[in-house]
Amino acid sequence: MRQTKLDEFLELEEQNKELEKLINLEVEKNRQKDKIMFQQNKMAAMGEMLNNIAHQWRQPLMEISSLFIPIQAKIDFDLDIDKKELNQTIIKLNEITKYMSNTIDDFKNFFATTKEKEEFKLSSQINASLNILSSSLKNNNIMLDIIVKKNPTVYGYKNEYTQVLINIINNAKDILIQRKIKNPKIIITIDEAEDEVIICVEDNGGGVKVKPIEDIFKPFFTYEKMNGTGIGLFMSKLIIENNMNGRLWVENKKDGALFKIITNK
Ligand SMILES: Nc1ncnc2c1ncn2[C@@H]1O[C@H](COP(=O)(O)OP(=O)(O)OP(=O)(O)O)[C@@H](O)[C@H]1O
Ligand SMILES: [Mg+2]
């Protein structure tokens, strides 16, 4: 009788050890799985960041290459390049590369909660966006009208705000070119209410042809465009609504689309 109990006990011990081994093996497997998942998440996040940076770099890269066209032409025709012209090109180049470098930093801490908000003048961020866009607007004969009713100060992330402006103006430009609109025009209006700052970007490109119209803010939603990735407006909405507590919306007007960015003062 006693012997049997001992046998049973020994057998149970053996089984427990086996079980423990199995558990350890499973735990180790799970740990490996977590590690792989973590790596995959990290890779996905990095891929997303690269996508965003690539998206925001397309326009400034184009601007840089068109900046040197007149200088290259002068060299080809053996003409003199005056110092003033060269200097202006260098100043602009510096501003554009500064923006490109800011873009990397912005995306690196896009979801960081520690970054500091600051006060900035809206007009200076509009100027920064136009630095990145002016040549391609000019080359496509797109008229740009800026109506400054007020020049308010905004509280938030100024570089990210510039990115939003660039995305919206760029979209208007793309549509105006693609639909071959006669007398293409973009009108930017700056205004302020009691505790809000309102910026409107309106074009005469015929409006958004998507229904429901809000779909254009979905990630990777692109329509009618040759090389669209559908990142631009999704990212813009994230910046304004999640990071700056504002609102970004769109409506169709008689001649085209109207985008409104509303943020707090
Ligand atoms: N001003 C506009 N007029 C008409 N349609 C527009 C306008 N702005 C955006 N859209 C529509 O919204 C869609 C989504 O825009 P979004 O900027 O998110 O992506 P995209 O421009 O297609 O791609 P990407 O920004 O990567 O070039 C566009 O494909 C276009 O159909
Ligand atoms: Mg776009």
Image: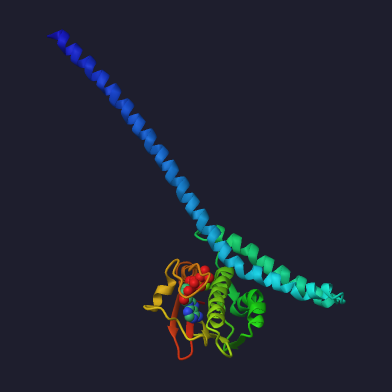
Residue at position x 50%, y 74% in the image: 225
Foreground of the two, 248 or 80:
80
Quarter containing the N terminus: top left
User: In terms of image quadrants, where is residue 89?
Assistant: bottom right
Can residue 47 be seen at all in this image of the molecule? yes
Residue at position x 61%, y 85% in the image: 142
Image-based side of 6 in relation to 169, left or right: left
Q: Percent from the top left, x then y, of residue 263?
A: 49, 76
Number of numbered tags placed on the structure image: 0
Q: Percent from the top left, x then y, of residue 103?
A: 60, 64
Foreground of the two, 251 or 12:
251
Residue at position x 83%, y 72% in the image: 75
Judging from the image, the colouring scheme is rainbow
Foreground of the two, 235 or 73:
73
Image-based side of 214 in relation to 144, left or right: left
Relative to residue 218, is residue 3 depicted above or below? above
Q: Residue furthest left?
A: 1
Residue at position x 40%, y 38% in the image: 31
Q: Percent from the top left, x then y, of residue 7?
A: 19, 12
Relative to residue 45, is residue 196 depicted above or below? below
Q: Percent from the top left, x then y, of residue 198?
A: 50, 82
Relative to residue 116, is residue 136 depicted above or below? below
Image-based side of 123 in relation to 197, left or right: right
